[in-house]
Image: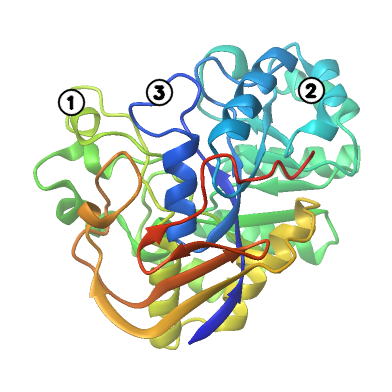
Amino acid sequence: MLKLPGLIDPHVHVREPGATHKEDWDTVTQAALAGGVTTLLAMPNTKPPIFDEATLTLALDAANAKARCDYGQYIGAGPDNADIAAALAPKAAGLKMYLDSTFGELRLDDMTLWMPHFQTFPKLAPMVMHAESRTLAAAILFSTIYDHPVHIAHVSLKEEILLIKAAKEKGIKVTCEVCPHHLFLSTEDIPAISHEHPGRGEVRPRLATKEDVHSLWTNLDVIDCFATDHAPHTLLEKDGENPPPGFPGLETMLPLLLTAVDDGRLTVEDIRQKLHNNPKRIFNLPEQPETWVEVDENAIYEIKATESFTRCGWTPFEGWKVKGRVTKVVLRGKTAFEDGKVLAEAGYGKNIRR
């Protein structure tokens, strides 16, 4: 039996408030525990988005009532909330800046809107960037100009990982995460995922080429964290005329990574570093005493959405054979998950910034 520390996922879309038909704090934290995740950090692009004290309170109240594992809630950077976001930094998991595609109150159309956030958000508080390709380069430049550490979300391209590598070599304060779907899937897998429904292959950043995937694997030492970017949408939505981008991932991340360990592509120590030690340091997270995950390393099985806890009810990894199953999760001395059953009650999860 393999024993791991409680895993930390710094990039999760909970969908509450505003889209609880896809997921809410109850189902997302059940899925997290089933995947060995004992702390998750929730993204702010909900409906309404989390960008001021009222909306932050709305999300945290829901989490306080429903969450079964520990959690934090990001605040979103908008075009005119820099002072508000900075004041709320002690209560937030960090600041999320959407430098590429998003809508509404969190849309940052040009770089002059980034400046106030870099100037006012506390230096010791995490800043997470949705930045792709050239905006990633701009985010690293801003980090240098304002001497503010930045964390780059969901790196997927060869050019991105090589730029981050070069920035680190220069001593620039940048860290990054990579999602399992960008490690294990490429553009060549889209037909198998889609099953004649193109929307099922839609994710942002998009799935990349095999060369990009290979570059992520050959630069594992540059990657600080693994993160799911768990983005649940229902199959009805994915198969509709305007499919929203995103994949669920909380329950498939660890088995996929453990299978890569079995294949010799990764080590258990890589998992400990990138799913516990590094995110704990980067996001200034408290200790979780008496917390661990037990895994049956030899369990071989197929991934099936019908056996998952996420409300969205599908996975791009349907039918994949994996090796390594979470058998037990102990959170703060209490058995929270065992033998396929979530045992932690709603409300047991703690706010990591409380």
For image coordinates 78% across by 40% down, the residue present is 353
Can residue 29 be seen here? The reply is yes
Sequence-wise, the earlier of marks 2 and 3 is 3
Cα–Cα gap, marks 2 and 1: 36 Å
Residue 240 circle label: 1
Residue 19 circle label: 3
Residue 62 circle label: none
Q: Toward the viewer: 352 or 76?
A: 352
Sequence-wise, the earlier of marks 2 and 1 is 2
Mark 1, secondary structure of its residue: loop
The reply to whether dot 2 and dot 3 touch (C-beta < 8 Å) is no
Residue 326, above or below 155: below
Q: Toward the viewer: 113 or 238?
A: 238
Q: Which residue is mark 2?
A: 85
Question: What percent of the width, then of the height, locates residue 95?
Answer: 73, 33
Can you tell which quarter of the image residue 242 is in? top left
For image coordinates 58% across by 66% down, the residue present is 330
Question: What percent of the width, then of the height, locates residue 187?
Answer: 28, 54
- Disc 3 residue type? Ala
For image coordinates 66% across by 31% down, the residue present is 97
- Count of residue discs: 3
Question: What percent of the width, then of the height, locates residue 261?
Answer: 45, 83
Sequence-wise, the earlier of marks 1 and 3 is 3
- Disc 1 residue type? Gly
Can residue 223 be seen here? The reply is no
Answer left or right for 215 relative to 92. left
Can you tell which quarter of the image residue 131 is in? top right
Cα–Cα gap, marks 1 and 3: 16 Å
Residue 205, above or below 342: above
Question: What percent of the width, then of the height, locates residue 156?
Answer: 49, 54
Mark 3, secondary structure of its residue: loop
Mark 2, secondary structure of its residue: helix
